[in-house]
Image: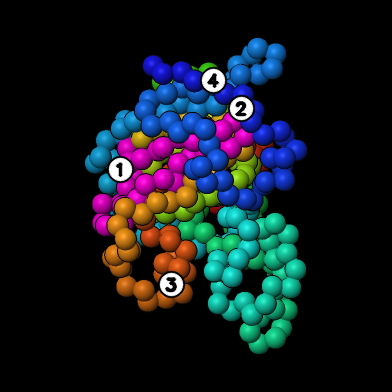
Amino acid sequence: MKTLFFTKQIDDESMRKRDCQYFDSSQYHTIVTEDCDGYIQEPDGSQRLLFKLRKGVIAKNLCNQAVDSFSKFAKKLRDNRGTAAGPITKDKIRNYVAEIISHSKHRAKFRRLDGTISKTDIGSLSPSQIVGYFDKKDRNKKGPVKIPCRLTAFTRDNQDKWQAAIPFIQRVDQIFAELVPEHYARQKARAELTPKFVIPDTSFSTITVNYSWRTACHKDKGDYEDGFGNLVVCEDQHNPNDYKGCCFGFPQYGVCVDVRGGDFLAANVHEWHCNTEFEPVQEEYISHEPITNEDTRIRYRNSWNYSRLSFVFYLRHKMADKCQETID
């Protein structure tokens, strides 16, 4: 097995200033394209796991089922993905926004087309959704809610698609257990504290599903920190827009990992990470779906139309702190 060791190329303060920004492939000195274990080499001589990449370990039939279950839902746009969604730009906000009044790195106050100022703020839109269980109350549900943990709306309303994807999720869990056993054992023990809010026979409560989305520099929040990040890429067999790039990068260490269809990446998602740029294989996008609404127009305008579907599997940290054994 190829093993690589990495030291910090960018200091911590400089990285904090690059939060919510993009790093292109030219800014990495190493691009990993084969099975590999990567470690952080600390100044005191100690080592920490940064990533493990295994190519082609997810069977094509499992990936195809995951695409069929989740791709349509993942394409829906949302504006609450934090700094991962990148800076606010005109191309990545809704058409009802007439003017940005003030903004932070990733949220903005705005004026509507009718001249009124919104009481809420917005972020950059992203083709990214969550499935499984979540540890926050449903803000759209009226009345008192005693139990904060719940099924996500997609999972509740699409049980046929969800059940069909369970073997895919269980295969990812199996690879996690084999490759990162110490982190897996801690996460599994934590998950067993709330078995009704865990995906069956896995250590995961939740999956983030991203369709053709390049993330900006960020660190994950809300997951169980003593576990480990798990990423799988599947490629949409119905989408003709092939690509290169969109590697998973650790810019502070100068390394990015080329994760393609059927690949598994165990990643320390509490280190700064993001994606490199997409590189189209063909000269123009092929319109494989009608551009009939604002979401599809925004997706095409932002190159969110490649065949890449990525899945991030994790355990929500607060499940064990907040959740009783009742599903709301």
The answer to whether marks 4 and 2 mark residues whose Cβ atoms lie closer than 8 Å is no
Mark sitting earlier along the chain (1/2): 1
Between 170 and 231, the residue placed more toward the observer is 231
Q: Residue furthest bottom?
A: 114
Q: Where is residue 181 in the image (x, y as percent from the top left)?
A: 48, 19
Is residue 51 found inside the magenta-colored segment of the image?
A: no
Residue, disc 4: 5
The answer to whether marks 1 and 3 mark residues whose Cβ atoms lie closer than 8 Å is no
What is the distance, in whole Å, between disc 1 and disc 4 at their CAs?
Answer: 31 Å
Looking at the rendering, the stretch of residues picked out in magenta corresponds to: 234-262
Q: Based on the displayed image, in which of its 4 quarters is residue 232 positioned? A: top left
Asked if residue 96 lies left or right of residue 13, the reply is left
Disc on res. 63: 1
Q: Based on the displayed image, in which of its 4 quarters is residue 124 positioned? A: bottom right
Q: Which residue is drawn at 41% across and 67% down?
A: 300
Look at discs 2 and 3 and give the one toward the viewer.
3
Is residue 238 found inside the magenta-colored segment of the image?
A: yes
Between 147 and 295, the residue placed more toward the observer is 295
Mark sitting earlier along the chain (1/3): 1
Quadrant showing the N terminus: top left
What is the distance, in whole Å, between disc 2 and disc 3 at their CAs?
Answer: 40 Å
Residue, disc 3: 297
Between 47 and 232, the residue placed more toward the observer is 47
